[in-house]
Amino acid sequence: MGDWRAHHRKLKERLLGSHDWVEFDGTISVHPLMNGWANEDESLLNVPGGVYRGVTLRAYDPVTGLWSIWWLDSRMPSAPLDPPVKGRFANGVGVFYSDDTLRGKTVKVRFTWTHPTPDTAHWEQAFSGDGGKTWETNWVTDFTRVSGS
C-alpha cells in the first residue's frame, strides 16, 4: 500500500525474438479496498512519446486462496478488460497466470511479484506462445516506496 516510484523496462515487440527494450519511469499509488480483501492502484506511465494511466484491481477469494488481477488502460478505456491473472503468494513470491491473445493467437500470461525489502517491490510479466513450455519476459518493473507513504 502507499505511493511508489516505478522504473519500467519492456520489450518493444512480444514473442517475436526482440531484444530491444524501452525504459521509462512512472508512479503508482496503491489503496486497500473491502477491508483488505481487495486493493486498487493507479499508475502513471511516462512512456517515450507520451504519458498514460492505468488502474489495477486485485481481489482475494478466501475459498480458493487465489488473488485475481485485472488491468484497465487509459489508452483503451472502453475495451473489454483482459482476463484476470490468478494466483497466490508462497514463500514471498506471487505467481499469477491467465490465457490471453496476442496478434490473434492464444498465449499464456504470467505475472511474478517479489518484495525484496519493505521499501522495494519487483514485478515481471512473461508470455508463452507454446502452452507454457517456454516463457519470454517482456516487462519488468522495479518499485521504490516514496518516503513517508
Image (cartoon, rainbow, N blue to C red):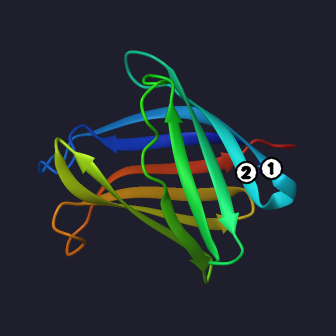
Residue matched to label 1: 33
Q: Residues within 10 Å of mark 1 (few under 14, many from 20)?
A: few
* Residue placed most toward the observer, 39 or 113: 39
Residue 112, disc:
none
**Residue farthest along the bottom direction in this orientation:** 91
Q: How many marks?
A: 2
| Cβ–Cβ under 8 Å for marks 1 and 2 | yes
Q: Secondary structure at mark 2?
A: strand
The quarter in which the C terminus is drawn is: top right
Q: Position of residue 132 (x, y in %)?
A: 25, 72
At a point 57% along the width and 67% down the height, the residue shown is 114
Q: Position of residue 64 (x, y in %)?
A: 62, 78
At a point 40% along the width and 55% down the height, the residue shown is 125
Q: Earlier in the sequence, mark 1 or mark 2?
A: 1
Q: Residues within 10 Å of mark 2 (few under 14, many from 20)?
A: some
Question: In this picture, is 117 found above or below 25?
Answer: below
Residue kind at label 2, given as amino acid type: Asn
At a point 56% along the width and 54% down the height, the residue shown is 69
Q: Secondary structure at mark 1?
A: strand
Residue 39, disc:
2
**Residue farthest along the left direction in this orientation:** 17
Residue kind at label 1, given as amino acid type: Leu
Question: In this picture, is 111 found above or below 17?
Answer: below
At a point 55% along the width and 58% down the height, the residue shown is 122
* Residue placed most toward the observer, 60 or 55: 60
Q: Position of residue 51 (x, y in %)?
A: 49, 19
Question: In this picture, is 126 found above or below 41?
Answer: below
* Residue placed most toward the observer, 130 or 10: 130
